Image: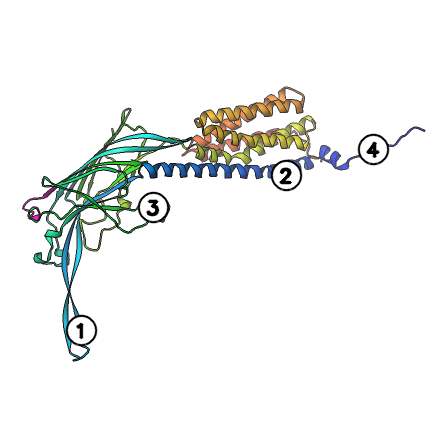
Amino acid sequence: MENTNTPPQNKFGNWLKTSITARMLMVGFLVIILLIPLTYISSLIRERSQRQTEVIAEINQQWGNEVLIYGPILKVPYKTFNEKTVTDKITKKVYTETIEEINDAYFFPEKLNINSNINPEEKKRGIYTTAVYNSNMTISGTFVKPDFSDIEINDKDILWDKAKIIIQSSNVKGVNEASLKVEGTNYGLTSKYNGQKNYAYNAVILHTLETKNIDKNQLQFQKPLTFNINLNIKGSEQIRFVPTGKQTEAEIKSNWKTANFFGEFLPYNDDKVSEYGFDAKWKILDLNRPFSQQHFNGIPDLKEFAFGVNFMIPVDEYQKSERSAKYGFLVIGLTFLIFFLIQTLSKIDIHPFQYLMVGLALTMFYTLLVSISEHSNFLKAYLIAGSSVIALITLYSKSILKTFKFPLFIGASLTALYTFIYVIIQLENYALLVGSIGLFLILAIVMYVSRKIDWNNG
């Protein structure tokens, strides 16, 4: 007897093949599933970026951190007298006792001239690079006679024989040489412990260098008191100065070509950058800054008014990789949309597993991009990773779609998509504009193509 039994039909499989709605749900579900590896990839990029930050911080710590110079400042002690009422415990008599206290007043220079010559170089550890430098600077200027009239201190209560000149710096570890002359007389600089701890990440703590007591005879101020300071300091990444002079003039020269000028004040000369490096000049008056020349309640924190130069490494590969990974959802979604339209219009069956393989190939682009960019520049890494993924998906599509025209169309579409994303990554001011226009055109193309689909068939 002939067996006429037929195997039971797979209703779900048939529904998935024939129903457009089912295919749309399947594609959407796979896109959501592929967000999981994309999340892990974004986490990997942040982890590698954090590792870069840690290694650069270690290099800078060993060589010498950024340099911030605050000063010089003339410190002059003075006496104050306070009356205190005291009651004798035995006689119960009340009398007044005068208590003498010694405080410090701080005076900024009348004129401050800063000349610095900086020779940066790249320092590497493994695959990570940072900019370090050796700086030679000359700081000169004048002090005028301190004015105590604001707090009504008599001249006899000013301790001129205890006056000192101090300089504050964020990096005393990198100091190779430091000398100070007042009216041609040498005064050695010694480091003074300020008791501050750097608990906050990337916080700038200023350390004090001070002279011995200035010769009282030099503080007669028949004319402005002249000073001259020579410093040789090793530092990293950036250097900056606080404009303490009533008139501050600064000039920084270097052979570094990718410098970034930053801070409260910028150089005034237009020809500061050339093919040989830069020669930047500043001129800052007391009218340009919101603080005075004398301070009687300690040294104020004026780091926010500093100006200087950042010796930046021009490219940040991890930042670009992270920006490209943010478009991962868009790349996967649009690629799946292309396959969905081809499948719907040509009636070619594409299995969900094949969609998944294409999606995983697209996520591999980002791991290739990060790993290659660590050993090369971003453009080369992008080209290698993009070409590899496009070639892989195009060849795999040939085995699925059995024709040449559809795989070639997919390859061309992926090439255009990756090129579009690369352009957006490179742009800063126009990234949103170009991205919006590009997405609008993509939507228009999809709407035009999808008009041929018979949506009544499932």
Can I make out residue 447 in this image?
A: no
Q: Mark 3 and mark 1: span between their CA atoms?
A: 46 Å
Q: Image quadrant for the C terminus?
A: top right
State the residue position of label 3. Answer: 203
Please name which of the two marks, 2 or 1, marks the residue nearer to the observer: 1
Tell me which label, 4 or 3, sits earlier in the chain. Answer: 4
Horizontal and vertical percent for residue 54? 41, 39
- Circle nearer the N terminus (2, 4): 4
Q: Residues within 10 Å of mark 3 (few under 14, many from 20)?
A: few
Q: Are marks 3 and 1 in contact (CB under 8 Å)?
A: no
The residue singled out by tag 1 in the image is 86
| Amino acid of disc 3 | Ala
Camera-near label (4 vs 3) is 3
The amino acid marked with disc number 4 is: Pro
Q: Nearer the viewer, residue 408 or 122?
A: 122
Callouts 2 and 1 close, C-beta under 8 Å? no
Instruction: Tell me: residue 157, above or below residue 432.
Output: below
Q: Which residue is mark 2?
A: 29
Q: CA distance from mark 3 to mark 2?
A: 46 Å
Q: Nearer the viewer, mark 1 or mark 4?
A: 1
Q: Amino acid at mark 1?
A: Val
Q: Residue furthest right?
A: 1
Q: Which mark is residue 7?
A: 4
Residue 427 within the segment the image draws in magenta: no
Q: Position of residue 382 (x, y in %)?
A: 48, 27
| Quadrant of the image containing the N terminus | top right
What distance separates the C-alpha of mark 2 from that of mark 1? 85 Å
Q: Position of residue 140 (x, y in %)?
A: 15, 39
